[in-house]
Image (cartoon, rainbow, N blue to C red):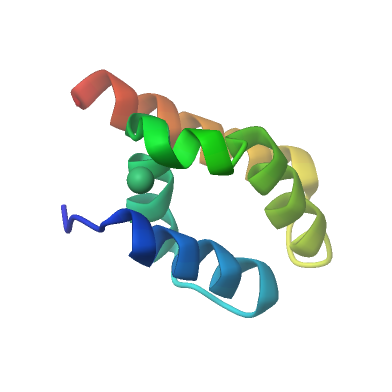
């Protein structure tokens, strides 16, 4: 998996909340957020997910999307 630094994560979160990021890019960013103490201080993962879910609720059922993102994050944490 591609690695990103904290600066790229900041940009990525901003982009995701304001336009579109590919699901793959979101995975890389959430993986970084899940494992980086520095970013954890700046971004609450649950808050970001809530915003993502709210933004996407026209496209997919919120519960289904939340489940998908959380499953993916659990997978990342288990393998890391
Ligand atoms: Zn970071």
- Determine the residue located farthest toward the top in the rendered image: 78
Q: Quadrant of residue 58?
A: bottom right
* Side of 75 where 65 appears, left or right: right
State the residue in front, 69 or 42. Answer: 42
Identify which residue is drawn at 41% across, 59% down.
9
Task: Identify whether 24 is placed above or below 46.
Answer: below
Residue 43 image offset from top left, x and y in percent: 58, 43
In the rendered image, is residue 24 in sight?
A: no
* Side of 33 where 14 appears, left or right: right
State the residue in front, 14 or 71. Answer: 14
Residue 65 image offset from top left, x and y in percent: 65, 46
- Where does ligand 1 appear, by image quarter? top left
* Side of 61 where 39 appears, left or right: left
Residue 59 image offset from top left, x and y in percent: 75, 66
* Side of 21 where 48 appears, left or right: right
Identify which residue is drawn at 58% across, 69% down.
14
Q: Quadrant of residue 18?
A: bottom right
Q: Quadrant of the C terminus?
A: top left
Task: Identify whether 28 is placed above or below 21.
Answer: above
Q: Quadrant of residue 30?
A: top left
- Determine the residue located farthest toward the bottom in the rendered image: 19
Identify which residue is drawn at 33% across, 31% down.
35
């Amino acid at each position: 998996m591609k690695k990103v630094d904290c600066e790229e994560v900041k940009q990525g979160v901003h982009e995701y909340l304001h336009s579109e990021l590919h699901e793959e890019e979101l995975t890389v960013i959430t993986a970084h957020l899940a494992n980086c103490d520095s970013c954890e201080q700046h971004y609450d993962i649950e808050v970001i997910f809530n915003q993502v879910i709210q933004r996407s609720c026209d496209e997919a059922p919120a519960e289904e999307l939340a489940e998908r993102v959380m499953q993916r994050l659990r997978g990342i944490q288990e393998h890391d």
